[in-house]
Amino acid sequence: MAPSSDIVANVHSAIDSSNKTLLKSDALYTYILNTTVFPREPECMRDLRLVTDKHPSGYMQSSADEAQLLGMLIKMAGAKKTIEVGVFTGYSLLATALALPADGKVVAIDTDRDCYEVGRPFIEKAEVAHKVDFREGPGLDRLAELLAEQEQEDGGEATYDFAFVDADKPNYVNYHEQLLRLVRVGGTIIYDNTLWGGTVAMPLGTLMSGLDTRFSAAIRDLNGKLAADPRVEVCQLAIADGVTICRRLV
Ligand SMILES: C[S@@+](CC[C@H](N)C(=O)[O-])C[C@H]1O[C@@H](n2cnc3c(N)ncnc32)[C@H](O)[C@@H]1O
């Protein structure tokens, strides 16, 4: 066959370790979703995702590729006891509950029970509701409650294997301190939105909404602190809105 005139030659010649990212087009993302993500997405998750897409705040839902990553990491870690801060309608929660073993548990924290109620029927239909311990209220308070329970039940020993944080960004640095006392050494803590729409790399003073200015600054602060934190190993992924994986070292 004659070579096409728009053939792409030497795709790697202009690449070094500082620009080795493939995500330069929406078409490439669609390709990933259609090739690897959607065909493997459990039906219950697809149903919940499509319902949540119609919710007025549907943009808050974790993406399907991120949920797939979450499920994979939970299985690879062999996690049994997990925490989620920021549930919304439960898409990432359902991914977590499906990935956990039959005797696994996820403590799911959110200030908004009504949104959780949107997703609860899907979690029940998937027969994983017994793994979910939903706790309504601010993350800081509910995590403090878990710390108190841990003190009573386990003499203060950290027993959680895994945590996923996807709630109020300015509190991530505070959640980090609490989670380092709840997640055991060797366990995993994941932070969502750690590139905040790419704003973290924009010049300081770039015009943004008040919320974006606050959240972007909070995420920058978090990223700097995590990178310098000797208590964790970190890995920044450019998936979704940025996902940072921390592994507790000490
Ligand atoms: C981006 S959404 C979570 C999306 C969810 N992970 C998913 O897959 O659909 C953020 C959630 O954090 C919750 N939230 C905001 N502030 C919070 C706080 N202080 N404590 C607990 N949850 C909070 C919101 O109610 C909202 O449901």
Image (cartoon, rainbow, N blue to C red):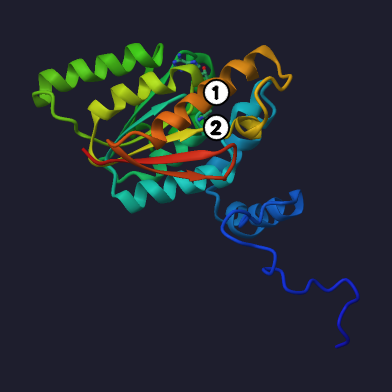
Which residue is at a point 46% across and 39% down the rendered structure image?
Answer: 244
Q: Position of residue 154 (x, y in %)?
A: 11, 26
Split into 4 quadrants, where in the image is the C terminus?
A: top left
Mark identifier at residue 193: 2
Measured along the vertical axis of the image, is residue 244 above or below residue 15?
Answer: above
Residue sitting farthest toward the bottom:
1
Q: Is mark 2 within 8 Å of ligand 1?
A: yes
Q: Is mark 1 within 8 Å of ligand 1?
A: no
Which residue is at a point 26% across and 14% down the rendered structure image?
Answer: 145
Q: Amino acid at mark 1?
A: Val
Which residue is at a point 8% across and 24% down the rendered structure image?
Answer: 155
Q: Quadrant of residue 47?
A: top right
Q: Amino acid at mark 2?
A: Asn
Q: Position of residue 247 (x, y in %)?
A: 32, 42
Q: Residues within 10 Å of mark 2 (few under 14, many from 20)?
A: many
Which label lies toward us, 2 or 1?
Answer: 2
Q: Quadrant of residue 139?
A: top left
Q: Secondary structure at mark 2?
A: loop
Measured along the vertical axis of the image, is residue 187 above or below residue 30?
Answer: above
Q: Position of residue 50 (x, y in %)?
A: 65, 36
Dot 2 or dot 1, earlier in sequence: 1
Mark identifier at residue 118: 1
